[in-house]
Image (cartoon, rainbow, N blue to C red):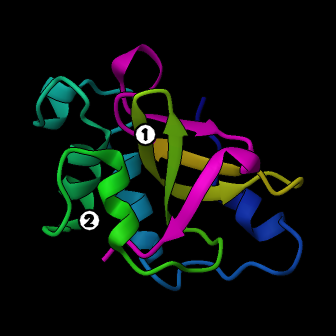
Amino acid sequence: MQESSSFADSFSTGFQTGVSAGVGVVDRARQFIGETAHQVGVRSTLWCSAFLRKITGAQDVDDRALSWEKHQRIAPQVGAVVTMGRRGGGHVGIVSGFKPNGDPIVISGNSRRHRVTETVYPRSSIRAWLSAI
């Protein structure tokens, strides 16, 4: 499900857009929507963090999604990296926009059907809002 970044424009006040990571990172991530790990050029298991490393250039994180939590915490915004908890680990992606209710639209690898997707996540599932660099 691909959503446009216009949600960020229509979202109510309280969120800055494109400040920490920049909209350029979101644009790079969107180029891979629908692709598999092989097509992206990263390993094929637990690859959400590897995908983000590829699009952001971050070198201080590893294959564990929650390793991104050592980055600076920032306000919710387009371009922020978000981590989410899951049983046995976590998931990580980059915010591409917001629904009117505040739920973030997130681009992430190894998502539904093991592809890069742009999906709405409940705001309550976000562990941390982080700088991409």
Residue 130 inside the magenta-drawn segment: yes
Looking at the picture, how far across and down is residue 95, in whole percent?
Answer: 55, 58
Looking at the picture, how far across and down is residue 133, in whole percent?
Answer: 30, 77
Please give the range of residues in magenta.
108-133
Looking at the picture, how far across and down is residue 71, in whole percent?
Answer: 36, 75
Residue 12 inside the magenta-drawn segment: no
Using a 10 Å C-alpha cutoff, classify the residue at mark 2 as few (fewer than 14 neighbours), some (14 to 19) or many (20 or more).
Answer: some
Give the amino acid at mark 2. Answer: Thr
Give the amino acid at mark 1. Answer: Gly
Relative to 82, say whether 107 is above or below.
above
Mark number, residue 70? none
Horizontal relation, residue 114 to residue 60: left or right: right
For mark 2, give the secondary structure.
Answer: helix
Instruction: Specify the quadrant that holds the N terminus.
Output: top right
Q: Earlier in the sequence, mark 1 or mark 2?
A: 2
Give the label, 1 or 2, closer to the camera.
1
Horizontal relation, residue 124 to residue 10: left or right: left
Label 2 belongs to which residue?
56
The image quadrant of residue 14 is: bottom right
Looking at the rendered structure, the number of numbered marks drawn on it comes to: 2
Q: CA distance from mark 1 to mark 2?
A: 19 Å
Label 1 belongs to which residue?
90
Q: Residue at x 35, y 19 (%)?
A: 114
For mark 1, give the secondary structure.
Answer: strand
Relative to 72, say whether 106 is above or below.
above
**Front residue of this view, candidates 62 and 47:** 62
